[in-house]
Image: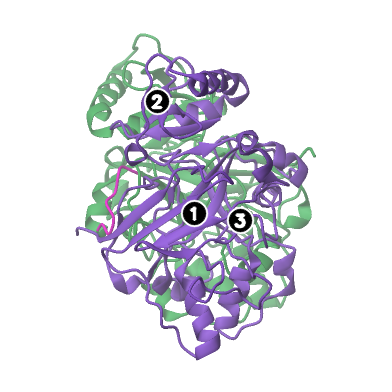
Chain colours: A green, B purple
Amino acid sequence: MKLASLKNGQRDGQLVVVSKDLSRCVAIPAVAVTMQQLLDNWSTLAPQAQEVYQALNRGAVAGETAFDQAACESPLPRAYQWADGSAYVNHVELVRKARNSEMPPSFWTDPLMYQGGSDDFLGPRDEIDVVSEDYGIDFEGEVAVVTDDVPMAATPELAREKIRLVMLVNDVSLRGLIPNELAKGFGFFQSKPASAFSPVAVTPEELGADWQDAKLHLPLVSHLNGTLFGKPNAGVDMTFDFGQLVAHAAKTRRLGAGAVVGSGTVSNKQGTDWGTSVEEGGVGYSCIAEVRMIETIRDGAPKTAFMKFGDRIRIEMFDNDGQSVFGAIEQQVVKAQG
Amino acid sequence: MKLASLKNGQRDGQLVVVSKDLSRCVAIPAVAVTMQQLLDNWSTLAPQAQEVYQALNRGAVAGETAFDQAACESPLPRAYQWADGSAYVNHVELVRKARNSEMPPSFWTDPLMYQGGSDDFLGPRDEIDVVSEDYGIDFEGEVAVVTDDVPMAATPELAREKIRLVMLVNDVSLRGLIPNELAKGFGFFQSKPASAFSPVAVTPEELGADWQDAKLHLPLVSHLNGTLFGKPNAGVDMTFDFGQLVAHAAKTRRLGAGAVVGSGTVSNKQGTDWGTSVEEGGVGYSCIAEVRMIETIRDGAPKTAFMKFGDRIRIEMFDNDGQSVFGAIEQQVVKAQG
């Protein structure tokens, strides 16, 4: 099943079921008005939504309209939980290497995870408002899941069963603010402004063979200002699967239905030390910082600039038939109006 | 105005207006069913709720019932944002001093703040479920505010105007998990399980002269297993007021209506180096860790134990007439059922 939330002037948008090919959609007010309502009562309501999805894929249904990705909120326009892991440890190794610090071996067995803000997600086509280019504006292409209720201290096995939806994320990061903020010891806050998610959220079942072992085995395609920047496979070099990430988040507390848990920046080593850029024939990266780290390690200093006002980032994923699975995140960085 | 959310088997509880003396309450379904609904439309709906509050304080109103603090959820049973500051820098100084590290001078001008989980707050009388006593279970008595929508990069002045409600918090902390977690560099996660808030949330206007300069000028009274543990004044030694804390949270992103922003553990220096325990005639502390730090600094090692299964913590605040302002958080630590 594929689901989205259309902008409707309300804080939580209008839940719609979207056809498999992303061409048409239909609201299901008799089932649920918002995505959160559906998630709050998933076991009861999801089968009803699934029936509508099947009918929509078979042919015309009453009330259907064309599906416009640009009219979407993020699937959850706001959420009660946004926990973002760092499952692609290559990304973490690179960060450390570029600043000449060793990565603790425990990072291969104990996931890094930070608590993100979830009260005001951006829509997938919304502008990224930033006060200053000096903040070091970067995108981070990731995969995320939405869970049902998860009990405290759930095992990874149980956590895997609680995954209800899969999405893409642009976890916007302000690199210039990170060093001072992490030095304070309390983690990210101002350096992680609002994230945006793909127009469409998809159930694991719908992903078929592309969803295995709680990982999504497809390339994550990022274009920066229209040029291919990366296409690493999200199923490759993912040290912790989503079951492990959700279990990490739930170790000392329950997760409420609708909790969003992210993978961290998708990154492949490609059999090399740190991966290779698209320019050099590799699969590239899912954030600018990694390219800058490679440049720092190799050349002594970064040369690729962070994003400037007017720059555009597009993040998308295609199945093996070339069909966009989640629709595209496509955002432009603009100067925030003071 | 005083407001609460009664447990009703739904995830967001039943919004009620509570009489000033906390004896009676009434639902206002024609205005809003849940606290979040009221906050989502505060400027329109709050005046209507305020009228009910005034009528309730004048005498009997249709549908009123006795108000039972034990029947309450936290005012927001789940929220879209929980950002907790460390405004009482004495608390931070103590932590650092106890581990022989200097506190950076910037901590006096740049607030510490961490992003907390908000998808599953505990009710004010709910048990604190913890898997193991070895986690180092501690309470943290704090004040928190709930905001309206706050624009990105809001000034502290503007942020002060956006404060809609004030509450107390028990920010449960697992001290044994903190060192390893902070060493990873991404801040708290597993070391900060679900928080609980006071039964009642109160508008700043209702607090009258006790609310000045976006600080709450009353003692925060904590009892551990029935014995007075602390009564520091929340208006004293608060380095950053709530306007500054909210502005810090909003520096690079908007805050959505219903965002909860905490003060951090209330702590008074009392004209001494680090404050004094109740036992020694001082106003005491709002968490066990501070007493242990004093013991470490003075005696070389802590002697006060963290909370054990069965231990009870009560956190409350009284106005100058001895009236409980927010009702009492009263929780018992129990072993989580695996």
Q: Secondary structure at mark 3?
A: loop
Boundaries of the magenta span: A147-154
| Three-letter amino acid code at the position of disc 3 | Ala
Mark number, residue B234: 3
Residues behind callouts 2 and 1 on a single chain: no
Q: Residue at x 61, y 56 (%)?
A: B234
Choose the circle earlier in sequence order: 3 or 1.
Answer: 1
Most extreme residue toward the front, as rendered? B321
- In this figure, which residue is indicated by the disc labeled 2? A18
Instruction: From the viewer's perspective, tell me whether residue B31 is left or right of residue A46.
Output: right
In front: A80, or B38? B38
> Quick one: B289 or A81, which is closer to the camera?
B289
Give the left or right position of residue A289, taking residue A53 as reference: right
Crowding at dot 2, Cα within 10 Å, few <14 / some 14-19 / many 20+, comes out as many
Q: Which residue is mark 1?
A: B116
Quadrant housing the N terminus of chain B: top right
